[in-house]
Image: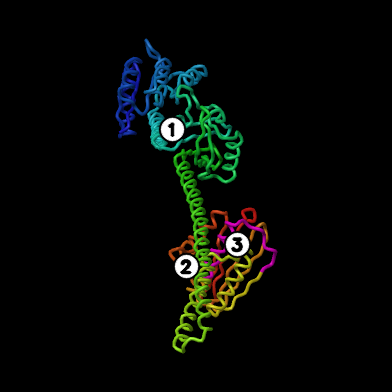
Amino acid sequence: MNKILAIDDNRDNLRLVKETIKKHIPDCVVFVAESGLEGIHSAKLELPDTILLDIMMPEMNGYEVCEILKKDKITSHIPVIFFSGYVKDPAGIIRGLDAGADVFLEKPIDPAELAAQIKVMLRIKKAEDNLKKEVQKYRVMTETLQDAIITIKLDEAIAYISPVAIKLFKLDRKIEYLHKNAYQFIFFKKSTVLRQLLNEVLVLGRVKDIEMLLSKRDGSEFYAEVSASLINDELNNPLEFILVIKDISNRKQTEIEILNYQHNLKLLNSEISLLEEKERKRIASYLHDGIGQTLSLTHINLTSINKQTPSTQVIEIIENCSELINSAIAKTRSLTFDLSPPILFELGLIPAIKWKLNQIEEEHDVKTVFKFHNKFPVIKDAIRILLYRIISELISNALKHAKPNKIEITYRINNATLSISVNDNGNGFDYKPKSNTIRQNGFGLFSIKERLDYIEGSLKISSKIKVGTTATIIIPLKNL
């Protein structure tokens, strides 16, 4: 229920006011005071929605009472309607407006006009109260958020800065920041960044989650995620910018640590690959120089015995042993090349690939084609080994899963990159970039991509069921 306070030293006027309000605005409660001091006390105690104030009173006139009420934070927001027998006096009107009055009514009071003016003041008071509640609600929301909130006027003056923002930028809490230039307190890495950001908001209406490096007042830096929007009036004209600044230093630090960890893992993986290749080479050398030589000498000795015209039974045994040894020699030689083909280290990647394709044709009855469009560049030993192993794995995957009758390898150099494609005309499959559809010995496309990622390379897959698959390795020339 609305409350009205009437202050007048004339009891007849007070009675008329009460009767008028009771008749025209029955849902109001009326309080009365017969002096200025009593009225001030009642206003602070009851906090009415409108005050009706007579100007001409003894001891303390209406102007003085109004000035006191408007200077007090508790009562400054209450609308005041002045009663006066001199409404047409310009000096009196000016003085009343300066004191804080909202409306002047002329005595004798017209009940209908009084009721109408009170209703207007009540509507204004209600609207102001609702607005204050909304403002307070949003202020509480912004001050309880963990993100910093700053509003900036179009003239670059700060309209609002939340306590979180003051703490985030390590600003002095004793300094009043409102109406000061935003560039004095919001420390972007470059002075032009904030202006560019606000200009972009003027064009787009809002920008969201822009990562940037900001500085605190003490010079320390932190990573932030900045979002900005426009606050418009009812005609959609821009009034202010609102900035939401989130400190993401911890997240960025975690991201950096993860990246460093991944980098170290890739370094370790590269070192393991090199060590693995050395071990392959050592085992291959042992097979070739040790077991292989022993088998060869044994074969020679058996052949020598066979030439000494032994019995038919001995000849048959020797020939069987010789066949077994020949088979062992062939398998040892094949295993040696599979482990670490000497041709890869002695002649290079291209001859090694051609040898690999010849081997496939012999062992799997699959036609192979090798195409090239440029002279192959000189590459580091580690890259040569890496590419050979990846190409071998892609070929092995094709033979195992796709069942092709043709495999084609093509390389070309363009746009500062080397691309090597392994194409088959096999079964094909439904490839999804985030899945490890092809796997071999526990390693699939993910493993290949990880190894390529270490040298800033990539693997592109295209496949169509019953048509075939193409896997393309792409590496920057600068990393070869």
> Residue at point 32% right, 29% down?
3
Q: Name the residue under label 1.
A: 164
Q: Does the magenta stretch include residue 333?
A: no
Kindly identify the amino acid type of the residue bearing the numbered disc 3. Phe
SS at mark 3 in the image: helix
The reply to whether the C-beta atoms of the residues labelled 2 and 3 are less than 8 Å apart is no
Kindly identify the amino acid type of the residue bearing the numbered disc 1. Val
Is residue 133 in sight in this rendering? yes
Q: Give the range drawn in magenta.
A: 372-396
Lower position in the chain sequence, tag 2 or tag 3 = 3
Give residue 345's mark.
3
* Residue that lies at the very extreme toward the bottom in this rendered image: 312
Q: Quadrant of residue 413?
A: bottom right
Eye-nearest disc, 3 or 1: 3
What percent of the width, then of the height, locates residue 6? 34, 23
- CA gap between label 2 and label 1 equals 51 Å
Is residue 116 in sight in this rendering? no
SS at mark 2 in the image: loop
Considering the whole magenta stretch, tell me its main secondary structure: helix
Give residue 438's mark.
2
